[in-house]
Image (cartoon, coloured by chain):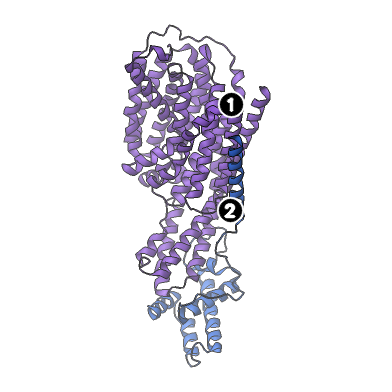
Chain colours: A purple, B blue
Amino acid sequence: MQPMVAGERGPVERLALAAVAVAVAIAFADSSVVVLALPELYGRFHTTIVGVSWVVTAYNAAVAAVALALVLVVHRAPARRVLAGGIVVFVAASVACAAAQSLPFLVTARTVQGAGAALLIAGALPLLGAHTWTTAGTFGAAVGPALGGVVTDAFDWRAIFAIQAPLAAAGLVAPLLARADASLDEGWRPSLARTLRPNLCLGLLFGALVGVLFLAVLLVITVWGYRPLAGAAIVSSLPAATLAVRPLARRLAARDAVFGGAALVALGLVALALLPSSAVAYPMLALAFCGAGLGLAVPLLSNDALETGAEATRSGTLTTGIRHLGLVLALAVIAPILAADLPPAGHRATLRATAVLLDAPVPLSQKVPVAIDVSHQFDRAQAGEVPDLAAPFDAHGARSDVQLARTRDRLVATVEETMTRAFRRSFLFSAGLAAAALAAALTLRRRA
Amino acid sequence: MKALLAALLVGAVVLIVVEARRPPDLPRIANPCLERRLPAGGGEVQRLILVGLDRAACRLGTSRETLVLSAGGGAVPGGPRWNRQTVDRAVRAGLIGAIDEAARRGDIPSFARPLLEEIVRRVPIDLLVRGALALTG
């Protein structure tokens, strides 16, 4: 397939290319698009947060596995067909996800969707060209959680998949319009070793993004109890900062931008690890740092990781596979860290909440029924659901009783702060990955 | 431009470090064997119960919070587990000690002391709680 250069494009072709760019952005956004919907998902399927996390992991693992396998063969296949096949599989799997009636079915559909995404992303690169492909991918990755949160709040989690199916399907117009694949066979040129360092940097950076795209979102939704729309507003500082730094990225030297970007991601993750409270300004600032880092580093690293001409598709497939591999490996390490840290934090939170209730200056006649209802909310949390700790107080008169309202606020803040601290080690591990990306960026500098 | 960015970064790092060093405002799980300030305005019955809980927890070598969660059937992961009789005995002994202390201070009339102690000895714990609620309601 021949890339459509600017001078040759008519309005129909431009629209078709825009549709493919949207499909690529959706495929990257899907890595994290359902994170804000996780509480709804485990409510629907009566499972735990660990069980439902496979909805996220399966997609990313499938993209990584299929993309890395495609590196061996993709240069022999017509990119037009790879793109069309990828879109068809992705759209069909999206419809299946939207119609899923059980968790195993949803996880299977997400796996197929990930395989389709890998094909879609690989086939789109020669058509879009490196710049548009990279921009669509970077913005898609950053906007994923916020987009999913808005759609979930406006409709429900199924709408995430129902809406993306026709949007991705529109991308089919481009391969249908493209001219015959005269120069599709790229041939076997084992020169991808050149892209190893930028790819290593990207893999580490995407591993670090687990802290941003998953941990931060889980914290906002499951610990701080924000609704998906409010959660989306908080995490929207991520794509906003990604967009905002684009003019700056053009003015900085490439290696400065990569180095500064990795440093900003590391700093943002350290800030998330040390969050002093659940006041929204702090996580928004920290996420903005991460988003700015993403906007500075990823486009330039992507350019470095992409070969031009005959090796373009293979290098694009390789870098896609390595990014998602970084994401999946980081998830595989961070999930057990968080799983180990949450139960003891939950125990500490329960003890502290009990202390708040015992010491509250309210009569026993209010204290005991509230305590019983609060203990039921803690039982919900142990079953993997999101507890509403304010509800028992409100049900027993906190809206009109100042002392009870103060006790409610103190208890909620105590539990939130205790649970927030349980995320510290996971955020610091993510920051460590960003620091490793920083070190890898230094080797890029030396190579120059 | 680079200097401005560097200054912003340094400022952000300083802000993060300052905020991170601020001690958390979290309730302490206090030693129940030491005297503590009791909440104001809860009434004498609540005061007796809180002092009684502290004394019971001290006897069992645990915190009053762990004791309350155990007594309420709540999960106390990694924490001590006692059978119902042990908790009952400790709570009754703690409440009787609290009644003695309140009588010595003159917070309850001395003639009521034997009666209250007998009630605590004989009445099932859940009935005691309901009775306390009725008294304060």
Residue at which label 1 appears: A254
Say which of marks 1 and 2 sits in front.
1
Q: Can marks 1 and 2 be said to lie on one chain? A: no
Q: Residue at x 52, y 89 (%)?
A: B106
Q: Chain of mark 2?
A: B
Q: Position of residue B24 (x, y in %)?
A: 57, 59
Is A276 located above or below residue A211 in the figure? Answer: below
Q: Position of residue A11 (x, y in %)?
A: 33, 17
Label 1: element kind: helix
Give the residue type at disc 2.
Glu
Find the residue positioned furthest to the right: A446
Q: Residue at x 33, y 35 (%)?
A: A98
CB of mark 1 within 8 Å of CB of mark 2? no
Q: Chain of mark 1?
A: A
Is B48 located above or below residue A399 in the figure? Answer: below
Res. A322 in view? no
Q: Position of residue B9 (x, y in %)?
A: 59, 42
Is A246 located above or below residue A369 in the figure? Answer: above
Find the residue positioned furthest to the top: A182
Label 2: element kind: helix
Front-lying residue, B49 or A137 = A137
Q: Residue at x 57, y 11 (%)?
A: A189
Res. A278 in view? yes
Within 10 angstroms of label 1, few (less than 14), some, or many (20 or more) residues?
Answer: some
Choose top left, top right, bottom left or bottom right for residue A326. Answer: top right
Within 10 angstroms of label 2, few (less than 14), some, or many (20 or more) residues?
Answer: some
Report, in whole angstroms, how far the alpha carbon at label 1 lies from the one at label 2.
33 Å
Is B53 located above or below residue B26 in the figure? Answer: below
Front-lying residue, A110 or A182 = A182
User: Where residue B19 is drawn, which disc sits there?
Assistant: 2
- Answer with left or right where residue A419 lies relative to residue A156: right
